[in-house]
Image (spheres, helix red, strand yellow):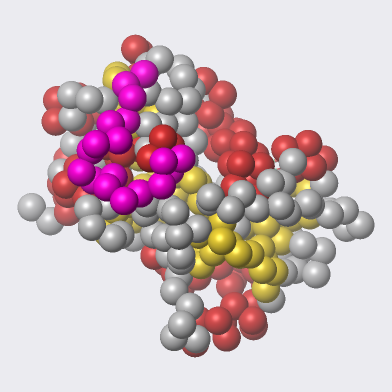
Amino acid sequence: MEYRKLVESLSGDDILDKFPEIIPLQKRPNTHSSNEEVSKEDNVFSGHDQEQIRLMNENCIVLDWEDEAVGAGTKKLCHLMDNINKGLLHRAFSVFIFNEAGELLLQQRASEKITFPDLWTNTCCSHPLCVDDELGVDGTLPSKVAGVKTAASRKLEHELGIPEGEIATNGKFHFLNRIHYMAPSNEPWGEHEIDYILFYKIESGKKLTVNPNLNEVRDFCWVSADKLKQMFQDPNLKFTPWFKIICESYLFQWWNQLDDLSSVENDTEIHRML
Ligand SMILES: *[C@@H]1O[C@H](CO)[C@@H](O)[C@H](O)[C@H]1NC(C)=O
């Protein structure tokens, strides 16, 4: 079956049947990580960084086609291409931080990352976890967006060392839309996500402290739209697949409208790039 049709055909119950490791939503542990220790002897982790292996035990939000939460599945389960090929899908977010000059904060992923190491990408890309304050428990889109913003603040501090307090006071998140895509990474890993796109604009006169966690982020820079287009021409620079998808579809149009995002934000449609 064509991949898109396969994913669309799976109900929440089908997904729980196919992947017995998933903890159904009603029984979720409401903890950031699974109780099961990730086995360091696991072949898929051979040669990888211990801290990054530990993070593969985090509980992602497994989804059906309509972005309804089905249960908690570990980051490892959700990122194995064998599972993705069977239709396993999870929730993610991509943050784009812009400064007062309209420049975008890019990061280069650390070499220690298990998926997509060393690639350049938008400010921060990660997953809300299957816990009450990141799930959006009432199931409406605004509550899911609120959950994703909570997760985004947590990860901006963890990856880039931007204090959550500064995120709360020095600017504002805008939810643009949701992009559904699938992309293989280095064997045996990949991504299959419904990705919430968040812009964050730093208020005039304010700043954010950036102090990267080198286990996550190798390098960062602030770029104008023209500079980013130049970077795409450089064969030595490699970019993540989701960042390329967003750049080729919406990014530059939205970037032009940074001063007033009201006509493009809070889009309820899920844009399928499958
Ligand atoms: C988008 O949603 C946010 C949060 O609910 C709200 O503050 C903002 O005004 C909305 N924007 C538009 C254009 O409706």
Viewer-closest of 104 and 1:
104
Give the image location of residue 32, x and y in percent.
47, 25
Front one among 250 and 35: 35
Q: Is residue 207 above or below residue 259?
A: above
Q: Residue at x 17, y 54 (%)?
A: 3
Asked whether the viewer can see residue 197, the reply is: no
Task: Indicate whether residue 62 is drawn in magenta.
Answer: no
Q: Which contiguous range is marked in magenta?
A: 35-52
Classified by dominant secondary structure, the portion drawn in magenta counts as loop
Farthest top residue in view = 27
Tell me if 81 is positioned left or right of 204 in this view: left
The picture places residue 2, in percent across and down from the top left corner, at 12, 56
Residue 67: name its quadrant: top left
> Vertical placement of 66 versus 255: above or below?
above
> Is residue 49 placed above or below 228 in the rendered structure?
above
165 or 256: nearer the eye?
A: 165
Name the residue rendered at 26%, 25% in the picture: 22
Q: Residue furthest right?
A: 205
Q: Quadrant of ligand 1?
A: top right
**Position of 240 compared to 70: left or right?**
right
Q: Residue at x 72, y 38 (%)?
A: 164
Q: Is residue 177 above or below residue 74?
A: below
Residue 20 is situated, as x and y percent measured from the top left of the image, at 18, 24
169 vs 184, left or right, is: right
Task: Tell me which residue sits at (43%, 25%) in the image.
Answer: 33
The picture places residue 271, in percent across and down from the top left corner, at: 40, 55
Q: Is residue 9 visible?
A: yes
Q: Quadrant of the C terminus?
A: bottom left
The single residue placed furthest to the left in the displayed view is: 1
